[in-house]
Image (spheres, coloured by chain):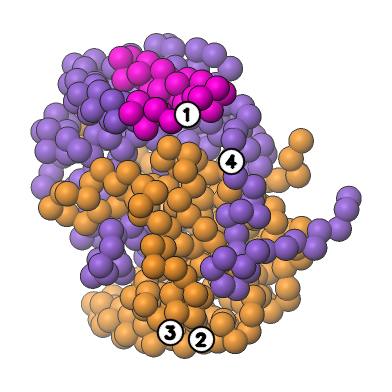
Chain colours: A orange, B purple
Amino acid sequence: MTHPSLPLYDAMSTQRAVRRLREDPIPDDVLKRLLQAGAWAPSGGNLQPWRVIVVRDDQRKQQLAQLYQAQWAVFAAQYQKGLARLTGEALAKQERILASGDYLSEHFASAPVVLVYCFNPKLMAITDSDLDRPSVVGGGSVYPAIQNTMLACVSEGIGCTLTTLLCLEEAAMKEILEIPKDWHTCAAVPIGYPQGKGHGPITRRAVEEQCFADRFGDPLVFQVTPP
Amino acid sequence: MTHPSLPLYDAMSTQRAVRRLREDPIPDDVLKRLLQAGAWAPSGGNLQPWRVIVVRDDQRKQQLAQLYQAQWAVFAAQYQKGLARLTGEALAKQERILASGDYLSEHFASAPVVLVYCFNPKLMAITDSDLDRPSVVGGGSVYPAIQNTMLACVSEGIGCTLTTLLCLEEAAMKEILEIPKDWHTCAAVPIGYPQGKGHGPITRRAVEEQCFADRFGDPLVFQVTPP
């Protein structure tokens, strides 16, 4: 018998990126449930080739925040340039996202917990490593665990967002968190109780636009019986 | 108001790899909920840089099955070699997994639906592409969607398992499913109602073994209040 949690579809349909977090600590029993959710996730050969460093120490969070801020500044400047052609509500929306990213960057060290995910490629069968395009398959044994923990955050009323900018500073990160040679980093997830409403309505493309029937590009038409 | 679904933690704590599937079709309303769950998942910049091909056509399933069977034969032979040192229950367990993999391979085309996931790296900010280790970050914008759909399968009583062996045959796969140049494949998930009990108890390392405190290797001790 597991702890009470939200119905699956309710959690999924309200999973927003929540970047404005309060500094209040996350109780250990809640934190344990978040991490347990991740540990339940499937992985290739059930090897669970990932670990998560639960960073709560102020000094280490500050060091990560400095790295993050430098990378965010570069990223945000590029992003801002991309908005030049937008106007009206489309522009306003992108500016809100950017402002929320700025906030996260400035307050990165104020999140009560930053979850830093590590993986060991030697424990993975990476079937797309020899292809002439970026490899992603190793992620198939880590990101399901991260997604489980993020869905658990929704259920527990905790804000979170998956960031990968710190991979650009992997060497420095490995030094700060004393990560051994064979392990690498793939995500940093700041978590904390939300300042605002937290999770809620999301904007996604219609399911019909994400799915094809039998070949790429053919529309999938659902024959759904009206309720 | 979303459709009724399992509590999150109950779905996660019973998500097994289910490889023995019945041939019965999956009703369209159920299939739509599975795919909607995936479409709700977060992705980098909310770009949803993935598509899923819902393969139900017998001829295309047979073609995929042939590719899968050839790769599985190679993989299974290697896996079998790795069992040489095992005895007793440990050996028996691995042999059960292998037998179940053999079954999936032989019956790959009998699954009512094979979900083939595609991604476009041009829609991804891959922050670990220049590192001297396998890249995984692109997977952070696809595998959460796949995990959502697989958790939805648990809730809907549908068996599933994430396979990545077909990436070894990406060129052939792209031809069979008419996937354009800029798109690539990262998973094939055969789904169907289970022959046996389907989802249920899982074996995972204890959460304490997956998590560290503040630096890699330091045990995380939870101060949990007894209920």
**Regarding mark 2 in the picture, which secondary structure is present there?**
helix
What residue sits 68% from the left and 69% below the top?
Answer: A193
**Separation of disc 1 and disc 3 at Cα?**
46 Å
Q: CA distance from mark 2 to mark 3?
A: 7 Å
Tell me if label 2 and label 3 are in contact, CB under 8 Å.
yes
The amino acid pointed to by label 4 is: Arg
The residue segment tinted magenta is B80-107
Q: Eyeballing the image, is B132 above or below A143?
A: below
How far apart are labels 2 and 4 at the CA level? 33 Å
Residue in the image at 29% along x and 46% along y: A126
Residue corresponding to mark 2: A63
Query: Of helix, strand and loop, which mostly describes the magenta segment?
Result: helix
In the picture of the structure, the residue carrying the numbered disc 3 is A67
Q: What amino acid type should be assigned to the residue bearing mark 2?
A: Gln
Dot 3 surroundings within 10 Å: few (below 14), some, or many (20 or more)? some
Q: Mark 4 vs mark 1: which is more N-terminal?
A: 1
Mark 1 residue crowding within 10 angstroms, few (<14) / some (14–19) / many (20+): few
Read off the chain for label 1.
B
Q: Residues within 10 Å of mark 2 (few under 14, many from 20)?
A: some
Q: Mark 4 falls on what kind of element?
A: loop
Q: Find residue A36 and report its horizontal and vertical position in percent.
A: 64, 50
